[in-house]
Image (tube, rainbow, N blue to C red):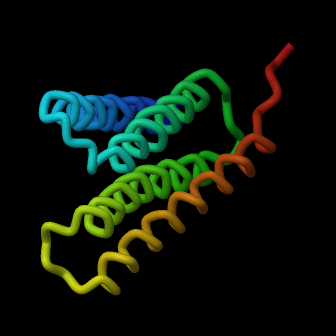
């Protein structure tokens, strides 16, 4: 359970960072009255903050049988959230000058890793440890 809680706290910290980033983006957009970063703002808050926070709370409270799946899921979730939001930024805003195919691949890879994370979380819900009576 100690290893599991370590991953839960890591997800919660990750969520806090993404929550701050997402609200900062929203605040900047609102202040400038320029809303081109809306998709990045929304996804940072939904997958970076909300999903990671929910996963962290779940792993903190619910004992799991397969800690390795918790680790893999947590890593995929964090990498996927970063990859998707960064890929979206590069694809939609593209201040980098990278070729469109590169930004599209970054967007797709990040989203695909995040999809794997959601699948792994679904699988993990079937490996909940039964409480001792």
Asked if residue 31 lies left or right of residue 119, the reply is left
Asked if residue 109 lies left or right of residue 17, the reply is right
Asked if residue 107 lies left or right of residue 67, the reply is left
Q: How many marks?
A: 0
Q: Quadrant of residue 21?
A: top left
As rendered, which of 76 and 101 lies closer to the eye?
101
In what quadrant of the picture does the C terminus appear? Answer: top right
Q: Quadrant of residue 7?
A: top left
Residue shown at 77% from the left, 43% from the top: 127
Residue shown at 65% from the left, 47% from the top: 121
Looking at the image, residue 68 lies above or below residue 87: above
Can residue 61 be seen from the camera position used here?
A: yes
As rendered, which of 36 and 63 lies closer to the eye?
36
As rendered, which of 42 and 77 lies closer to the eye?
42
Can residue 2 be seen from the camera position used here?
A: no
Residue shown at 40% from the left, 30% from the top: 12
Residue 115 rendering spot, x and y as whole percentages? 59, 60
Residue 116 rendering spot, x and y as whole percentages? 60, 62
As rendered, which of 71 and 102 lies closer to the eye?
102
Looking at the image, residue 57 lies above or below residue 104: above
Q: Residue furthest right?
A: 133
Residue 53 rendering spot, x and y as whole percentages? 48, 30
Looking at the image, residue 110 lies above or below residue 82: below
In what quadrant of the picture does the N terminus appear? Answer: top right
Residue shown at 40% from the left, 69% from the top: 107
């Amino acid at each position: 359970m100690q290893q599991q809680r370590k991953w839960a706290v890591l997800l919660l910290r990750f969520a806090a960072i993404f929550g701050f980033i997402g609200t900062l983006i929203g605040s900047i957009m609102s202040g400038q009255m320029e809303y081109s970063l809306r998709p990045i703002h929304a996804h940072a808050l939904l997958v970076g903050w909300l999903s990671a926070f929910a996963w962290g709370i779940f792993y903190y409270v619910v004992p799991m049988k397969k800690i390795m799946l918790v680790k893999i899921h947590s890593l995929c979730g964090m990498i996927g959230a970063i990859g998707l939001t960064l890929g979206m930024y590069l694809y939609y805003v593209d201040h980098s000058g990278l070729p469109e195919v590169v930004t599209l691949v970054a967007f797709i890879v990040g989203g695909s890793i995040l999809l794997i994370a959601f699948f792994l979380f679904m699988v993990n819900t079937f490996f909940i440890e039964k409480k001792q009576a």
